[in-house]
Image: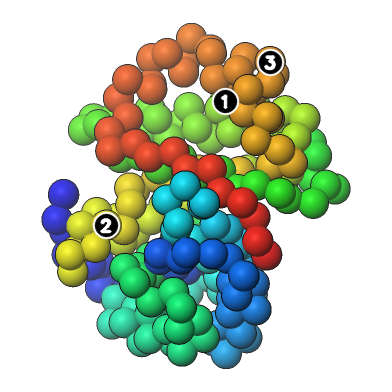
Amino acid sequence: MIRALTTSCPTDFLLLRFSLAAPASLADATRRFCHDNAMSLYRAAWAAQSQTACVYARLHARAHVPASALPALADAWATCCPSATTGVTVSRLELVLDKPGVSQQATPAFHYMVETDPEDGWRDEIFRWYDTEHMPGLATVPGCIHARRLLNHDHGLHDGLDHGALSLACYDLVSTETLGSSPWLAVRGTAWSDITRPHFTNTRRTMMQAVA
């Protein structure tokens, strides 16, 4: 779906995504970007298979960020990390659910993202399922450090670039094996899950190595 950018919207995080052949310079670049733009770094992560990376930069307080600010932020990223300027997207994220996981004292080794656009008429039901059953349940699984769900106000295709889907669920994990564990699969296999999941569209699941 091709859509126009919302002029201004509530923003808790900026999500930068781009192509990156190797993560060697990513940690230092993200810290420099956040420092220069008066933000804090939540997570930087890299996917070896697709050679893509993402950076979550957290605003110190929720703000209404205008669409006009996004090109300058993309340019600022290019200054901080000249090796990662291909296909850069900057999306405004609104935090709607924040659940510390049962393994919250552990160091994140992986970052797992699930992006989806609810089918027409199913948005409220899917979001209720996410926020009252699914993500609270996954947060209790050993190996889950943190679970968050965010709305991507810049979702869809614009300026020739894919900014992802509306709903972004992300998990910091101890290991990729957490996803195949019996407790994780039990949470995924509920009756309510079977009702809602067929109404996901444009779904993308990405496992990434946590870099910073």
What residue sits 58% from the left and 79% below the top? 29
Residue at disc 1, secondary structure? helix
Q: Position of residue 150 (x, y in %)?
A: 48, 51
Q: Is residue 97 visible?
A: no
Q: Position of residue 97 (x, y in %)?
A: 56, 46
What residue sits 54% from the left and 20% below the top? 188
Q: Is residue 22 visible?
A: yes
**Mark 3 / mark 1, whichever is N-terminal:** 1
- Residue behind mark 2: 162
- Between marks 3 and 1, how big is the CA–CA gap? 17 Å
Which of the image's four quarters has the C terminus? bottom right
- Locate residue 4 relative to residue 174 in the image: left or right: left
Name the residue type under label 3. Ser
Q: Position of residue 9 (x, y in %)?
A: 36, 67
Name the residue type under label 2. Asp
Circle 2 crowding by C-alpha within 10 Å: few under 14, some 14–19, many from 20: some
Residue toward you, 68 or 144: 144
Name the residue type under label 1. Glu
- Between marks 3 and 2, how big is the CA–CA gap? 34 Å
| Label drawn at residue 182 | 3
Front of the two marks 3 and 1: 3
Circle 1 crowding by C-alpha within 10 Å: few under 14, some 14–19, many from 20: some
- Residue behind mark 1: 133
Front of the two marks 2 and 1: 2
Up-down relation of residue 26 to residue 118 (above or below) = below
On the image, which quarter does residue 41 sit in? bottom right
What residue sits 68% from the left and 15% below the top? 182
